[in-house]
Amino acid sequence: MVARAYRQVVRRMRRARQTYVWNGPVQEGSHPSRKRLSWFEVPVARSISASFLEALNDALDESGKRACEDEWCALMNRLLDAYVGADSGLERSTRRTGSPHGSAAVVIVDERLSLPDPFACSRWDRRAAFRRLLRAAKDAHPGQTPWIVRSGDRGSGPWLSGTALTLSNDACLTTHDGSFHALLPEVRHVYTLGATEGLYALLRGATVHVFGRPYYAGWGLTDDREPQYGRRSSPTREAFFHAVFVRLAHYLDPSSHREGALDAVVASMELQNEVARRYGDIRSIAACGFQWWKRPFIKPFLEGGAAKKISWVRKPSGAVAEHHIATWGARAVRHSRGTVPRLFIEDGFLHSCGLGSDLSAPFSQVIDRSGIYFDPHRPGDLASLLNQTVFDDAELARARALRERIVAAGLTKYNLGRRRPTWTAPADAQVVLVAGQVADDASVRFGCPGIRTSEALLHEVRKRRPAAWLVYRPHPDVLAGNRRGLIGDPGLDDVVDVIDTTADIVSLIDAADEVHTLTSLAGFDALLRGKEVFTYGMPFYAGWGLTHDAISGIPARNRPLTLDMLTAGVLLRYPLYWDWELGRFTTAEAIVCRLRAQAQRSRFAMQPMALRAVRKAWRWSRNVVIHLAQDGITGSRGSHERFP
């Protein structure tokens, strides 16, 4: 008896400590393989639903003590507007044209037969309830054309509409792609068993007819067709929103990947909408000449936050009239059908924790409609942005804070780790760093009308700084053996004091008084760190009054810039940033958080060529398989994979 009683006590204690977690009210854009953006979490003392309702009652009691409905209403409307902005095109998702808009527009929310929701009833009961729902909607709205919208709630099994009575021929069917929220401002009646869409319809002010027992029913805010138990208050919409979305729901901060608040998730949703609007006029893309391994890396950037059709073609002749032709860098493309809109794609300036030539996944890329940033003779979007944008104080303050965080974290483009120089310059010597480049680098070909090689640059710098301690740093792609370029040469012994192949570029910049370069991004890194920068070509950061330029009159430089203005244009407005783990666009600040830990690791010498070749081969094979799975075989858009 004692042992049995003990076991019962232990079971009760274990049950009291159990916590149940399920999807929260915000799941916009979240793929099943990704982390949840929001979730509910309750300790289970009795049933899951009873425990949650008890917590919700307590939250409503607390919300009732705070008279902040204006503040809650503002946050609620911001969330609802973010959902409407996420609409990816109602016309493309419907089976027939027409409009449900009217004085009493009716929407029926279709759901999966089974749901991982503690408030969902059995499969049999759900079938029967959905049949009652259909009959009630038809009887209550004679002559109305119902729209059946598929819920975005995760579930399994067939759609309930397929298991119920045959639908009326004049019903419209739209799959769930955000269009439900675009419909909501015009919808008067929503019929649901208990989908999350019903909650949002409630917040929008629609009449929600509920045929199940979701947690949002029974509070006097819905038309309930089933008895609801355990509710002890009648809150306003704003108070209910605050209790559910602010007090009870948990959120993943998309920037830090730690637990955060609703406003951070809403800001991320607004960012997705901003990117979608930025490229909203692009409906289909012919991506020309991209190798298979590169395609999974650029696909999320090309899609630009909206549902676009991407065709992978080897030559521009594979494009059709309505396509935008996308190419890597400034690759020349001729199109036999005449002028076709172009998209120029390149790596961004906070790229990865590894070389792009080693097939490291990019956190940042740029998509330019006019040219590309390293071609001064064909000014692109960056030049227009820097020439024309009026940056307000808030954006400049954000740029300044970002620059300070980049410097503090020791970040640059590839972030290969940190290692201080082993050499020591003579006392009182002026330390001049010369940044080497790849021999056939596109920025050199397009932006260097005079000096075009690292050897010639070193001789020119020595001529200008005869007494300086001159340090040459070869390009990391050259050191890795991936590209051609200068590493060392006996003929440079009288020109260079040190050829440093081991220290990281940020440590070398910190040790230098001046940085001299043709067009290297190291010059921009040095500017961010307050160094004197001398350019001998026409990089994107030259010609704005911030650098000492050997070439005067660089095209498309029409005004002087401050460093914060340059930072705002180059790092905040121009690139796109992608979070591979969440499958969402993100901010420069978030990428700084992602890169910071890896960038601070100790930098070792380049791995043996054989080992690096094996790693590259594995990455190449992985990307090709992903591309075939997403596009080459199924032809579907698929989901964006995570990359380390």
Image: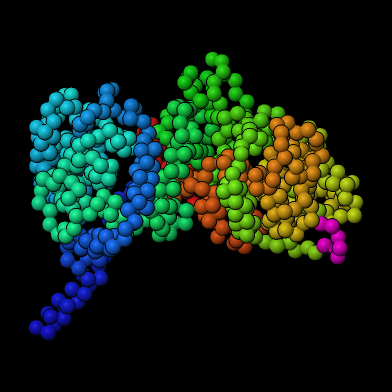
Q: Is residue 64 above or below residue 455?
A: below
Q: Quadrant of residue 333?
A: top right
Against 142, is 527 above or below? below
Residue 430 is inside the magenta segment: yes
The picture quadrant where one finds residue 641 is top left
Q: How many marks?
A: 0
- Tell me: 460 left or right of 28: right
The quadrant of the picture occupied by the N terminus is bottom left
Q: Is residue 112 left or right of residue 384?
A: left
Q: Could you tell whether 428 is left or right of 47 in the image?
A: right
Residue 630 at x, y percent in the picture? 40, 37
Residue at the (65%, 48%) spot, across then down: 564
Give the residue at the far bottom of this rendering.
2
Q: Nearer the viewer, residue 218 or 514?
A: 218
Position in image of residue 194 (x %, y %): 19, 46
Can residue 548 be seen in this snapshot?
yes
Q: Position of residue 220 (x, y in %)?
A: 17, 50
Horizontal arrangement in the rendering, residue 448 relative to residue 16 (left or right): right
Tell me the residue at 41%/58% (across/down): 260
Asked whether 165 or 333 is in front, the reply is 165
Q: Residue drawn 12% across and 79% down?
A: 4
Magenta segment boundaries in residue numbering: 425-431
Residue 607 shows in the view: no
Q: Is residue 31 above or below residue 502?
A: above
State the image quarter where residue 11 is shown: bottom left
Q: Position of residue 8 (x, y in %)?
A: 14, 76
